[in-house]
Image (tube, rainbow, N blue to C red):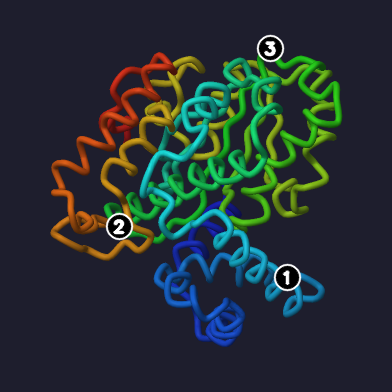
């Protein structure tokens, strides 16, 4: 672990400062009144925007533009109720763009894992763009919830995570058309535009020369600060050594890389949040964090059974079976 990483981790764990307070208030005031309370119920959501543009040349304009854009997007995907049900296209999306959760590193960052061999760009390209946007948003919100819960358990503020992408089997056909490039840009762009200041590091491993073409398709929608966090490494063995040197123990690194962590499929974790009908705010309601009372007319048990039937069908078509809680190996 470097001194720079330690400094950045300390800054991340620091609550909002007095110097940041005016920027926080200004940013939150720019959110439409009908969602201001919901947006501000998780203060780090606003802090991420404030800190994400603290070094921008036009800080005020960029901060206001970003938070306004985020608020508009949240409204369009029903973000504050995004775990109320399995969204249309849920099964197809998670079957054709598989991800998983590993970690944490020594600082407490989760690891978002993508293996290119588990991504079917042809199928993703054919999906309805509005559905795709909502499903990617639901997934990114799930990662935010995961980080919030882990931060509370560890007692240290953490809103960033590491992205690990295994480029083995990447093909030029993945970016052979403008539609495919647009689909990739759309998915990665949602994280870049609507979840600022949430990336700790990005590891791109086993990348062949052809990856340069793929990366060039994604690079335009990435912030310069994000690009600076990218680590391009070679084989699993050399990547493992690099990640360990950066403070990621083997217990947090996927088994297929030589680590000891069995990652949890992201689809299962999202399913878990849907079954809980996890609310936006981490308030304790009904005795459980994020729990909500059942709607009038159906008992809580009936609601759970209804959701379980819906999602069991979706997961059956993905070959995953029933998705229950699963804990990632931790240090």
* Apparent side of residue 223 relative to residue 330 in the rendered image (left or right): right
Nearer-the-camera pick, 88 or 171: 88
Residue 260 percent coordinates (x, y) = 38, 21
Residue 139 is marked as: none
Quarter containing the C terminus: top left
Q: Residue at x 72, y 16 (%)?
A: 170
- Element at label 2: helix
The answer to whether marks 1 and 2 mark residues whose Cβ atoms lie closer than 8 Å is no
Residue assigned mark 1: 55
Tag 1 and tag 3, C-beta contact below 8 Å: no
For residue 60, what is the image quadrant?
A: bottom right
On the image, the x and y values in percent for residue 114 come to 57, 28
Residue visible at 74% across and 46% down?
227
Mark 2 to mark 3 CA distance (whole Å) = 38 Å
Instruction: Give left or right: position of 11 versus 309.
Output: right
Choose top left, top right, bottom left or bottom right for residue 175: top right
**In this picture, is 151 found above or below 140?**
below
Rendered image: mark on residue 169:
3
Mark earlier in primary sequence (1, 2): 1
Helix, strand or loop at label 1? It is: loop
Tell me the mark number nearer the camera, choosing from 2 and 3: 3
Q: Residues within 10 Å of mark 3 (few under 14, many from 20)?
A: few
List x then y, in percent, for residue 25: 54, 85
Residue 234, located in which quarter of the rendered image?
top right
Observer-nearest of 164 and 119: 119
Q: Residue at x 20, y 35 (%)?
A: 305
Mark 2 is surrounded, within 10 Å at the Cα level, by few (under 14), some (14 to 19) or many (20 or more) other residues, namely few
Q: Residue at x 24, y 58 (%)?
A: 292
**Residue 202 placement, left or right of 280:** right
Residue 152 badge: 2
State the separation of the CA atoms marked 1 and 3: 38 Å
């Amino acid at each position: 672990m470097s001194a720079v990483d330690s400094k950045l981790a300390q800054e991340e764990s620091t609550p909002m400062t007095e110097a940041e307070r005016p920027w926080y208030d200004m940013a939150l005031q720019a959110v439409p009144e009908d969602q201001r309370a919901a947006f501000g119920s998780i203060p780090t959501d606003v802090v991420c925007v404030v800190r994400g543009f603290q070094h921008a040349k036009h800080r005020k304009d960029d901060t206001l533009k970003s938070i306004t854009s985020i608020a508009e997007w949240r409204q369009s995907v029903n973000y504050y109720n995004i775990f109320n049900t399995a969204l249309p296209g849920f099964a197809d999306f998670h079957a054709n763009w598989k991800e998983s959760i590993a970690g944490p590193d020594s600082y407490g960052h989760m690891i978002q894992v993508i293996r290119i061999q588990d991504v079917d760009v042809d199928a993703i390209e054919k999906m309805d763009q509005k559905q795709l946007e909502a499903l990617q948003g639901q997934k990114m919100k799930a990662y935010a919830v995961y980080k919030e819960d882990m931060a509370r358990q560890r007692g240290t503020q953490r809103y960033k995570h590491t992205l690990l992408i295994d480029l083995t089997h990447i093909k030029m056909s993945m970016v052979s058309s403008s539609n495919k490039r647009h689909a990739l840009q759309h998915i990665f762009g949602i994280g870049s535009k609507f979840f600022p200041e949430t990336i700790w590091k990005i590891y791109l491993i086993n990348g062949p020369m052809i990856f340069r073409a793929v990366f060039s398709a994604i690079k335009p929608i990435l912030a310069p600060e994000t690009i600076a966090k990218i680590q391009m490494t070679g084989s699993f063995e050399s990547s493992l050594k690099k990640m360990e040197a950066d403070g990621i123990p083997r217990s947090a690194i996927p088994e297929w890389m030589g680590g000891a962590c069995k990652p949890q499929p992201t689809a299962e974790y999202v399913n878990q949040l849907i079954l809980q009908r996890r609310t936006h705010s981490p308030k304790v309601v009904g005795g459980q964090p994020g729990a909500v009372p059942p709607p009038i007319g159906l008992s809580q048990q009936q609601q759970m059974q209804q959701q379980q039937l819906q999602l069991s069908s979706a997961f059956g078509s993905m070959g995953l079976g029933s998705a229950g809680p699963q804990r990632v190996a931790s240090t």
